[in-house]
Image (cartoon, rainbow, N blue to C red):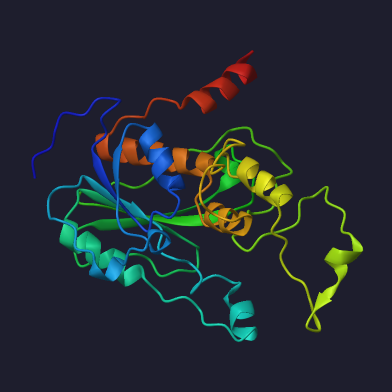
Amino acid sequence: MQTRGKTMFDRGLVLSLFPGIGLLDMAFEEEGFCVVRGPDLLWGGDIKRFHPPANKFDGVIGGPPCQAFSRLRYFVVHNGLRVAENLIPEFERCVVEAQPRWFLMENVPEAPICRPATAHIVHSEQVVDVWCGGETTRKRRFDFGTLCGAPLRIVGEALHRVDPMPTVTASGGTPPDWKPTPRHLATRKGKAATGFKSKAYLAVAKRDQGLPPDFLDKAPFTVAGKIKVIGNGVPLAMGRAVAAAVIKAVTGNAAPMHAATASVRAMIDV
């Protein structure tokens, strides 16, 4: 595969699988990658019908749905609902077909490690959002495969908050300063109401995922829909740290410090 010369603003062409609302994509784009989004159910796409071209992408990134491996899946089963299908094999198939130089799969720590039938050597690393300068306790595992066996070394912040916020969830939650009213305490069909999808929680979700207050303001989603897609995404601080680690692994050079991280460290140095 021919590889173009890379500059700090040209990290290569990357295919994003299961992109959702594109939070992991945003982090890689900020670090100079050109990201091409694959199909997603959110936009009416079907990964099972998707066949990427071979030898066109430098890397493949993505996070297959995690519900099949999440600890919360037991609540799904208990409520008589169907657990989402394991689509990691589809991610592996796309890597086999695309034949990239490297790939990165994000999922919960309990998920099977991504091992496509290729020559890639896979390393896994777990990371918590707050370690990367983020706001929450969200923990994820990243499986990183390269043809040369380069490990993924995610560098966290030397100083980070000691009182992180809870993980932003797709099912909604309660803002820390919110006080329930009698209506919210009422039960429905004999069962206590669960989850809390409100504009107040949406604002908290944006903040804690590292997103601007106006993110998705013009998107044609309900409040519950916006909370769901934001909660399913990778926190922006975590994504930036991972993207920087990928750059270092595939080029052998440390990535330029992101502006947001640089400003924090500048204040610390002062």
Residue at the location (91% across, 64% down)? 182
Task: Locate the C terminus and report the quarter of the image it occupies.
Answer: top right
Closest to the observer, 255 or 220? 220
Q: Is residue 157 left or right of residue 53?
A: right
Q: Is residue 81 left or right of residue 66?
A: right
Q: Is residue 130 visible?
A: yes
Q: Position of residue 247 (x, y in %)?
A: 32, 36
Q: Quadrant of residue 94?
A: bottom left
Extreme residue in the right direction? 182
Q: Position of residue 148 (x, y in %)?
A: 21, 48
Q: Position of residue 234 (x, y in %)?
A: 50, 50
Task: Locate the N terminus and report the quarter of the image it occupies.
Answer: top left
Q: Is residue 135 visible?
A: no
Extreme residue in the left direction? 2
Disc tally is 0
Q: Position of residue 31 (x, y in %)?
A: 37, 32
Closest to the observer, 202 or 240? 202
Extreme residue in the top direction? 270
Q: Is residue 162 left or right of residue 140?
A: right
Relative vertical location of residue 169 with respect to residue 255 in this rendering, above or below:
below
Closest to the observer, 69 or 125? 69
Residue at the location (67% across, 44% down)? 203
Residue at the location (64% across, 78% down)? 75
